[in-house]
Image (cartoon, helix red, strand yellow):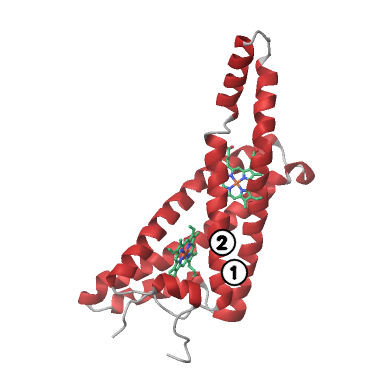
Amino acid sequence: MTRYSFRKYQPLSLRLWHWLNALAILGLLATVLLRKTFLSWRSNAALIEAKLQAAGTAITSEVAKDIAVSIRNPMWDWHVYLGFTLGALLVIRVLVGLLVIKKCPATHAAQSAWHLKNVPQEKRGQALHYTFVKTGYALFYLATLFMVISGLLMQFKTELGLSKEAIGPIKEIHELMMWFFVVFVVGHLLGVVVAENRGDRGLVSDMIHGGENEKGS
Ligand code: HEM
Ligand code: HEM
């Protein structure tokens, strides 16, 4: 009978991809956190204006905003650098899929969903959970593709001649989609910890050293 384990041999290319991808995603989320908190132009412009006023120097709100935005920008450049990195990693993941793993994450998720009806009752829960996890990965790749395309469209809006009206909704959805990644990262981290404790012991170290080789196991 099928054992619904998440453990399998992880090729070196996927392991390297996985950790670089994790760094890129966490880095992107960190730049957003900084933009919305410590480096928010709204609160920093108000602070600059208030401090200068207290020191006896008059400053317009526009200049205060300009200073706050100029302080934020070098940090935000990292959003775009990491964004390009994420785009490159997505291309690499497609190549790893085509050349090494030879399995498409979406097909894999669809196949486990399709086989659900043949799964005996006592295994149904496990099979559903397996399908849920694999669907999560397929959605992760789809969402990443959207972030990369929308990010590039925003970055090159002038070169592409995109109007403000066209960019507005793209930016809104890009911003909203951030929540998918927040939920994915939290769910994924909790998920691997639970799996390690439930019968998939060694899952995380497999993602580091590869685990039992398919041929050797
Ligand atoms: C925080 C950012 C992270 C992201 C975006 C991420 C993303 C992913 C993705 C997309 C996969 C599926 C790979 C595939 O088969 O196509 C995966 C698998 C995996 N990840 Fe992560 N990961 C992150 C962090 C971590 C961390 C910190 C750990 C360990 C503590 C971890 C452990 C694993 C393991 C063990 C698997 C294989 C499990 C399985 O096939 O279900 N990940 N990760
Ligand atoms: C998981 C990946 C990503 C997340 C979570 C994310 C998140 C965000 C968020 C929340 C914003 C709105 C910031 C604000 O206006 O307050 C934003 C804007 C932006 N992002 Fe991303 N992003 C990601 C990937 C990318 C990629 C791949 C690129 C491509 C280069 C990119 C380029 C941009 C650009 C150009 C902006 C507009 C900034 C502006 O209006 O000044 N992002 N991103």
Q: Farthest right residue? A: 159
Q: Which element type, helix, strand or loop, lies under badge 1?
A: helix
Q: Amino acid at mark 2?
A: Asn
Describe the element under mark 2 as helix, strand or loop: helix
Do the residues bearing badges 2 and 1 touch, measured as CB atoms within 8 Å? yes
Query: Which comes sooner in the sequence, label 2 or label 1?
Result: 2
Outermost residue on the top side: it is: 56
Residue 21: numbered disc: 2
Question: Where's the N terminus, which quadrant?
Answer: bottom left
- Disc 2: CA contacts within 10 A as few (<14), some (14-19) or many (>=20): many
C-alpha distance separating marks 2 and 1:
9 Å
What residue did someone put label 1 on? 93
Going by the picture, which residue comes out furthest to the front?
55
Q: Position of residue 81 (x, y in %)?
A: 67, 51
| Above or below: residue 14 compared with residue 56 | below
On screen, residue 115 versus residue 29, left or right, reads left
**In the image shown, does 96 or 39 lie closer to the viewer?**
39
The percent coordinates of residue 93 (x first, y second) are: 59, 69
What amino acid type should be assigned to the residue bearing mark 1? Arg
Cβ of mark 1 under 8 Å from ligand 1: the answer is yes
